[in-house]
DNA sequence: TCAAAAATGATAACAATTATTAATTTATAT
DNA sequence: ATATAAATTAATAATTGTTATCATTTTTGA
């Protein structure tokens, strides 16, 4: 894999985020710095970086994938109301993989743990019980 | 919500599955029994049933959502090679939600636990290390 | 410095899903 | 049973997220 300025920009822009942006968010932000960067380039490089383990693709929200520059194992919370993804800095339970391996025939490489519910913001703004479960 | 024959068909067809089909699989299967049913009707009813809590939408595979007629809490395994989703009949860890609630401000209603790896079929057919991580 | 390999930007193509709308079906009050 | 309002449908257009194509530009290494 050769060097590319655009790939570095994508990786850097993602690293600025502590939320977990989608490809189009990264794209919009980068366009301001580099008005010629292409949407396809952003998708291409996010894919490459995820495949070589530099970043992580989060696939547990319906619709657009989210990306995470933090690749060491950690858990997430997803708001069923607005779809926001935030980190849960609790300890990772490595024993879960051993337990699960007793029940399945394939090879387990890891697990994703996603807590679901309604985020603070949606709670207070009353968005919660109104369209309860917009993301379902 | 009024009765509809099509909604019953969708729910019944899903209940036949122990794997976790996508909307288009349900659609293709139903077309053989009921050649006039529409794709939009399948999507509409899967959505309604999921919002209802009659069935469960599985959003942790990139691309198409999967659906599960088994609504009581249980865990899954996803093959990173072929995308297949299978049940993991291990015990559900309710304590996880309590632990997580100490770290986040929102309201937790539950969690999804997804084990990842390579399924038996992909292991033996050598598909695994070839395109390692096709779904990433 | 030149050629091969890799990457890019622009955009077409594709896949998954939702929106629209006229026609049909269901529930309901007579 | 009948009329009517509300819900649902089939067909299909539209939208969204993502990948493929391809001519041009960059990178790399001899």
Image: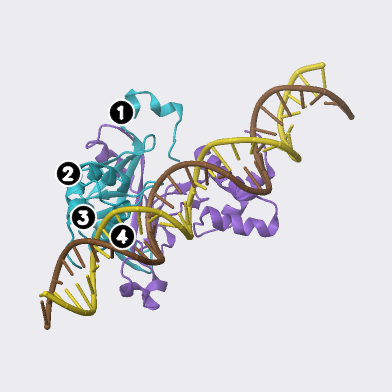
Chain colours: A cyan, B purple, C yellow, D brown
Which numbered mark, 2 or 3, is in the foreground of this view? Answer: 3
Image coords of residue B7 (percent x, y): 63, 44
Q: Nearer the viewer, mark 1 or mark 2?
A: 2
Distance, label 1 to label 4, CA atoms, is: 36 Å
Q: Secondary structure at mark 4?
A: helix
Question: Which residue corresponds to mark 3?
Answer: A6
Looking at the image, residue C1 sits to the left or right of residue A74; the answer is left
Labels 2, 4: one chain: yes
Residue D28 x %, y %: 13, 71
Considering the numbered disc 2 on the image, is that residue within a helix, a strand or a loop? loop
Is residue B19 visible from the viewing direction of this image? Answer: yes
Q: Residue at x 49, y 51 (%)?
A: B67
First in residue order: circle 4 vs circle 3: 3
Label 3 environment density (alpha carbons within 10 Å; few <14, some 14–19, many ≥20): some
Does dot 1 land on a helix, a strand or a loop? Answer: helix
- Camera-nearest label, 1 or 3: 3
Q: Is residue B104 above or below residue C13?
A: above
| Residue linked to disc 2 | A16
Q: Chain of mark 1?
A: A
Instruction: Provide residue B88's location: percent of width, then percent of height.
Output: 40, 58
Respond whether the residues carrying marks 1 and 2 are from the same subunit: yes
How far is the residue under mark 1 from the one under mark 2? 22 Å
Q: Is residue A60 above or below residue B97?
A: below
Mark 1, residue position: A121
Q: What's the residue at 42%, 47% (across, down)?
A: B73
Q: Which residue is mark 4?
A: A99
Earlier sequence position, callout 1 versus callout 3: 3
Q: Do marks 1 and 4 share a chain?
A: yes
Of tags 2 and 4, the one toward the viewer is 2
């Amino acid at each position: 894999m050769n060097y590319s300025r655009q790939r570095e920009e994508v990786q850097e822009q993602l690293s600025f985020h502590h939320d977990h942006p989608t490809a189009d968010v990264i794209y919009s932000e980068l366009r301001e710095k580099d008005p010629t960067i292409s949407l396809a380039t952003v998708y291409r490089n996010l894919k490459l970086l995820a495949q070589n383990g530099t970043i992580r693709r989060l696939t547990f929200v319906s619709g657009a994938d989210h990306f995470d520059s933090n690749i060491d194992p950690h858990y997430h919370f997803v708001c069923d109301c607005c779809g926001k993804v935030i980190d849960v800095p609790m300890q990772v339970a490595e024993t879960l993989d051993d337990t699960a391996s007793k029940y399945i025939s394939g090879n387990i490489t890891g697990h994703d743990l996603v807590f679901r519910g309604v985020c603070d913001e949606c709670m207070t703004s009353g968005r919660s019980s109104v369209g309860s479960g917009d993301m379902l």
